[in-house]
Image (cartoon, grey):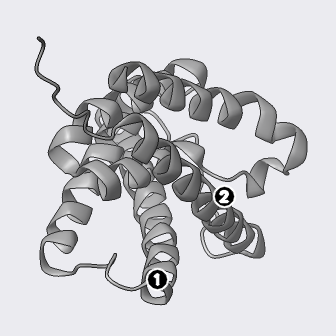
Amino acid sequence: MKNYFLFVFCFLAVVFQLSVLGNFFDAKRLPDLVLIFSLTLILSLGFERSMVWLVVAGLLLDAGSNWRLGTTSLALVMLGMGLERILRFAEIRSRRFLFVLLFGIIIAFSKIVFDLASQMIFWMTAYYKKQPAGIQAAFFSQDYFLKIFYTILIGYFTYYIFRKLSRKLFAPQPIVPKR
């Protein structure tokens, strides 16, 4: 049941990012639901238990877009490893206000790192294939800041829903001896 729930959550995040959100947001301001899904999993389950789902989400997103297959998975796994290193030393879930503030900072920082890692993967691929890099990044513009802001707002909502559902679905079942 747990794996089924995670697959549905992962699939819905990818489908919403590729199809539904494009109708509500400008293409330059589109929030990154797969990144939010990945951060939610890493914070809730830990990196080791969520690594498979990071790869699956990245492959689903790459299959639905015009990116090279595996690019998003590699960027998400690198981001997950870095976030796991930070979470070893800092417990951010101790206080609510502190968690809200730090979760927003983690989403903003992760979005910047994710986009930079994706761009570097594209540039390295273009360099070794002796082709010009076709994607130019416009970091730190007004649209990029709004993209980060929308990602943070949707991230709070997604994390809240995931935590509420995971408490109900992933709660340990009491072991009742059979008579």
| The residue positioned farthest toward the right in the image shown | 23
**In the image, what residue type sits under mark 2?**
Ile
Q: Is residue 130 visible?
A: no
Question: Which residue does the image show at 76% across and 75% down from the upper left?
Answer: 142
Question: Which amino acid type is shown beneath numbered disc 1?
Answer: Arg
Residue 110 lies, in percent from the top left, at 42, 65
SS label for mark 1: helix
Residue 33 locus on image (x, y percent): 59, 46
At x 19%, y 55%, the residue is 81
Q: Quadrant of the N terminus?
A: top left
Name above or below for residue 15 compared with residue 75: above
- Residue 77 sits in quarter: top left
Q: Residue at x 21, y 81 (%)?
A: 90
Asked where in the image residue 172 lies, by quadrant, the reply is: top left
Q: Residue at x 51, y 51 (%)?
A: 164
As measured in the structure, the alpha-carbon distance from the residue carrying label 1 to the one carrying label 2 is: 18 Å
Q: Which residue is mark 2?
A: 154
- Residue 14 placement, left or right of 110: right
Q: Foreground residue, 34 or 8?
A: 8
- Please state, as top left, top right, bottom left or bottom right, where the C terminus lies in the image: top left
Asked if residue 114 shows in the view, the reply is yes
Circles 1 and 2, Cβ within 8 Å, touching? The answer is no
Q: Is residue 151 above or below residue 78?
A: below
Please give the residue where the numbered disc 1 appears in the rendered image.
96
Q: Residue furthest top?
A: 179
Image coordinates of residue 51 in percent, x first then y, are: 23, 38
Comparing labels 1 and 2, the label whose residue is closer to the camera: 1
Q: Is residue 123 left or right of residue 10?
A: left
**Residue 136 position (above or below residue 34):** below
Q: How many marks?
A: 2
